Image: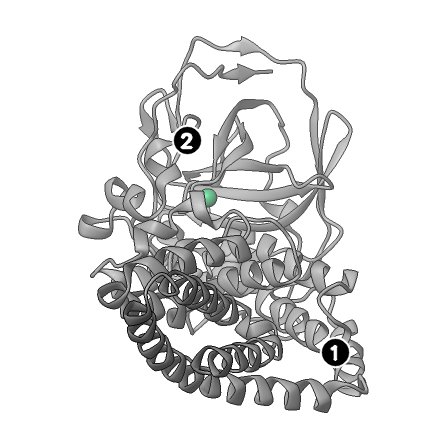
């Protein structure tokens, strides 16, 4: 009789688990894993009546706890259903799309918001949903915006993409859930763990385990880095493994021997409304669409450019006053950075325009009204270059970035260097590790 009751509970619990929304998938799979465990426990118990009764009692207690847990989840699921219903006729999405169409480019935060709204309105399979999250991820990876990176990564995973998710992006509830079970029931913990990883695509290898059960989780949840001391470049590898273990890191000390290159590069930058961002590590100018560089005829769209003081690249062992990094991406997602060195000299009119429009607030895009800028104003006439395969010079230090450092530096006045809000934001030069340094 008890066994039948138990099975009725099981069916009810499974149906309950079935109604969870997208957001609760992981909790639901944990719940399902628990149920599987309980079934196994019940079967094993048939061996002896006494054992059976004890097991069933324990299972029922656990079932009780599970149902309480699920009641909580169901509440959340109801909220999600309500949100979906409210958005179902699509007018909120259409309104926002109309509003955003007037903007020439959307910030990563807005892209991720659009992704979420599209997912709730049109579903995770809609190509526009995926596209929003992809764009947000591309933009935010370059701008060190962790919350947006996480939102975009989790959005892509929810939409079925197999991508790596940073360990610090995993929902807090998941980590807490782990902790709870740890002391109580080692067996069900392992199963739950496996299931969760399935739901997360490639998370498993990435370092989810690093964060798991770690007392430093609080710190983990808010990664931060800088250029000095405890947060300095030597420590970046702790949170961002590529920074320490990478094989083609930037910047480099540029000195011979050089290998002759036949690559041809050019830049065609367009004037557009000025958009600036102080991301907490540098001053960044967000490019208007349409500015490109070409590498052997292949177009790379300018995404943004930003500054380092002093220059990150050294020339024969010495840095210049500053460097501007113009970050581009081609249709296949390959990144290319054009580096323009700035040496102390005459006042630079382009820099004057930028510095007189510095954002007053950190991490908020600032678009001064009526101010246009052409990034081409910061390029020298001569386009001779050094080139090498490198990486982003800030965490996560992603590799596969082609660098072109122009040999000709442009001028910047000493006062202009001093007016740059960051006194030191240059990563030290990195080992060459067998890479070729090209020269044209
Ligand atoms: Zn840079």
Percent position (x, y) of residue 259? 53, 9
Distance Cα–Cα, label 2 vs label 1: 42 Å
Can see residue 222?
Answer: no
Label annotation for residue 33: none
Above or below: residue 371 compared with residue 161: below
Q: Mark 1 packing: few (<14 Cα in 10 Å), some, or many (20+)?
A: many
Horizontal relation, residue 94 to residue 254: left or right: right
Can see residue 254?
Answer: yes
Please name whichever residue, 155 or 3, is drawn nearer the observer in this view of the structure. Answer: 3
As helix, strand or loop, the secondary structure at mark 2 comes to: loop
Residue 15: image quadrant is bottom right
Query: Of all residues shown, which one is farthest toward the front?
Result: 49
As helix, strand or loop, the secondary structure at mark 1 comes to: helix
Name the residue at 56% across, 52% down. Answer: 350
Please name whichever residue, 173 or 361, is drawn nearer the observer in this view of the structure. Answer: 173
Q: In the rendered structure, which disc, 2 or 1, sits on the residue that comes first in sequence?
A: 1
Name the residue at 49% across, 83% down. Answer: 5
Please name whichever residue, 77 or 411, is drawn nearer the observer in this view of the structure. Answer: 77
Could you tell me which quadrant the C terminus lies in?
Answer: top right
Contact between marks 2 and 1 (CB within 8 A): the answer is no
Horizontal relation, residue 334 to residue 205: left or right: right
Percent position (x, y) of residue 124? 71, 66
Q: How is the image coloured?
A: one colour
Kindly identify which residue carries mark 2. Answer: 249
Query: Of all residues shown, which one is farthest toward the left?
Result: 229
Name the residue at 36% across, 20% down. Answer: 316
Percent position (x, y) of residue 435? 46, 17
Kindly identify which residue carries mark 1. Answer: 121
Q: Mark 2 packing: few (<14 Cα in 10 Å), some, or many (20+)?
A: many
């Amino acid at each position: 009789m008890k066994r039948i009751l138990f099975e009725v509970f099981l069916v009810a619990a499974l149906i309950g688990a079935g109604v969870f929304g997208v957001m609760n998938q992981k909790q639901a799979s944990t719940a399902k894993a628990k149920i599987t465990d309980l079934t196994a426990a019940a079967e094993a118990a048939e061996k002896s009546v006494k054992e059976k009764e004890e097991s069933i009692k324990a299972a029922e207690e656990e079932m009780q706890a599970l149902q309480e847990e699920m009641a909580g989840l169901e509440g959340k699921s109801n909220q999600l259903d309500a949100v979906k219903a409210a958005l179902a006729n699509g007018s909120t999405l259409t309104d926002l799309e109309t509003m955003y169409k007037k903007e020439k480019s959307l910030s990563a935060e807005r892209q991720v918001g659009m992704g979420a709204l599209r997912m709730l309105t049109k579903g995770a399979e809609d190509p526009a949903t995926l596209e929003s999250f992809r764009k947000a991820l591309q933009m935010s990876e370059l701008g060190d915006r962790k919350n947006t990176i996480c939102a975009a990564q989790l959005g892509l995973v929810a939409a079925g993409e197999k991508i790596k998710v940073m360990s610090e992006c995993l929902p807090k509830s998941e980590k807490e859930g782990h902790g709870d079970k740890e002391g109580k029931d080692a067996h069900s913990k392992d199963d739950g763990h496996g299931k969760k990883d399935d739901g997360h695509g490639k998370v498993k290898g990435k370092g989810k385990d690093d964060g798991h059960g770690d007392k430093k989780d609080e710190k983990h949840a808010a990664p931060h880095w800088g250029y000095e001391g405890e947060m300095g470049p030597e420590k970046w590898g702790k949170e961002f493994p590529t920074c320490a273990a990478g094989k083609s890191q930037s910047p480099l000390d540029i000195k011979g021997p050089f290998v002759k290159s036949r690559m041809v590069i050019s830049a065609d930058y367009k004037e557009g409304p000025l958009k600036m961002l102080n991301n907490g590590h540098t001053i960044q100018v967000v490019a208007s669409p349409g500015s490109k560089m070409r590498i052997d005829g292949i177009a790379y769209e300018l995404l943004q450019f930003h500054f380092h003081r002093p220059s990150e690249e050294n020339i024969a062992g010495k840095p210049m006053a500053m460097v501007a990094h113009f970050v581009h991406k081609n249709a296949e997602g390959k990144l290319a950075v054009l580096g323009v060195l700035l040496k102390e000299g005459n006042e630079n009119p382009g820099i004057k325009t930028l510095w007189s429009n510095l954002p007053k607030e950190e991490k908020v895009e600032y678009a001064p009204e009526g101010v246009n800028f052409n990034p081409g104003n910061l390029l020298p006439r001569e386009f001779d270059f050094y080139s090498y395969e490198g990486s982003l010079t800030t965490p996560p230090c992603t590799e596969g970035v082609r660098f072109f450092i122009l040999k000709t530096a442009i001028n910047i006045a000493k006062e202009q260097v001093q007016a740059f809000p960051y006194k030191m934001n240059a990563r030290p030069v990195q080992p060459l590790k067998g890479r070729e340094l090209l020269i044209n």
